[in-house]
Amino acid sequence: MVTPEDHRLAADLATRAGELLLDIRARLAADGAPAAALKHEGDQRSHEFLMEALAEARPDDAVLSEEGTAHGCHPERRTTARTWIIDPVDGTREYSEPPRTDWAVHVALAVDGQPLVGAVALPALGCTLSTAQPPPSDNLPPIPERPRMVVSRSRPPAEALAVCDALDGVLVEMGSAGAKAMAVVRGEVDCYVHSGGQFEWDNCAPAAVALAAGLHASRIDGSPLTYDHADPYLPDLVICRTELADAVLGALADLSAPSAPSAPTSEA
């Protein structure tokens, strides 16, 4: 069961963790600290804050965090249907390179494996998008003639590039998974396809927000995104405008379809 307080808690914790991260980044950057120091302290402090806050607010729920799950106040995940799935800093590289804004904080709640609650804070942009007040997709601008496909700056997956070609789209480079997904929710881009390997904490909160906002979110084969598995590896996803879903999934299906054998040639 999910309550309105769960939605508000996710948004509040993601926002407060983001504020903490901004303070840490400003302090360390002013001291001339190297990028590695920003990554380490930001990840650790945000993780500790979120784990302690959830232990106090939801002591009977389990927690899965990118930075580890050990916490004496939380039950093991197999003993409860409710698991908070958090990424204390989504996009540590981007976070460690001030003044970049394309990083995020993820706080989500999966109930019986379903991504029902989520918040994605974009601290450097001063906003948090969440299931508490999901932005309606019917307020988004029309999809341009050439859809905008958001991809990683350094390693765009081949599937995303192929879908972009199939849709005669335009590539938009961006950092973290949360930043990319929220760019779709915010109407800055139209589609996000990932196939290079992720874990549940990378996309649970973004998927929850996207679904609550009325967007399409699924695996690249069109199957639902489910969470709180024993193995948290979740390598692929699609988040896009619903108007593009059939075209995107169709292009992905064409990529995975076996090539038809060539017709035999007749011998003279």
Image (cartoon, rainbow, N blue to C red):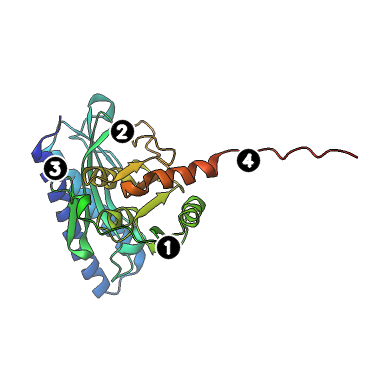
For the residues labelled 4 and 3, the Cα–Cα distance comes to 46 Å
Q: Secondary structure at mark 2?
A: loop
Q: Give me the disc on residue 139.
A: none
x then y, percent, for residue 93 = 36, 61
Q: Quadrant of residue 204?
A: top left
x then y, percent, for residue 212 = 21, 43
Q: Which residue is mark 4?
A: 259
Q: Which residue is mark 1?
A: 170
In this rendering, would 258 be left or right of 133?
A: right
In terms of sequence position, does the residue under pointer 2 or pointer 1 come before the other?
1
Q: Which residue is mark 2?
A: 228
In terms of sequence position, does the residue under pointer 2 or pointer 4 come before the other?
2
| Amino acid at pointer 3 | His
In terms of sequence position, does the residue under pointer 2 or pointer 3 come before the other?
3
For the residues labelled 2 and 3, the Cα–Cα distance comes to 18 Å
In this rendering, would 12 be left or right of 163?
A: left
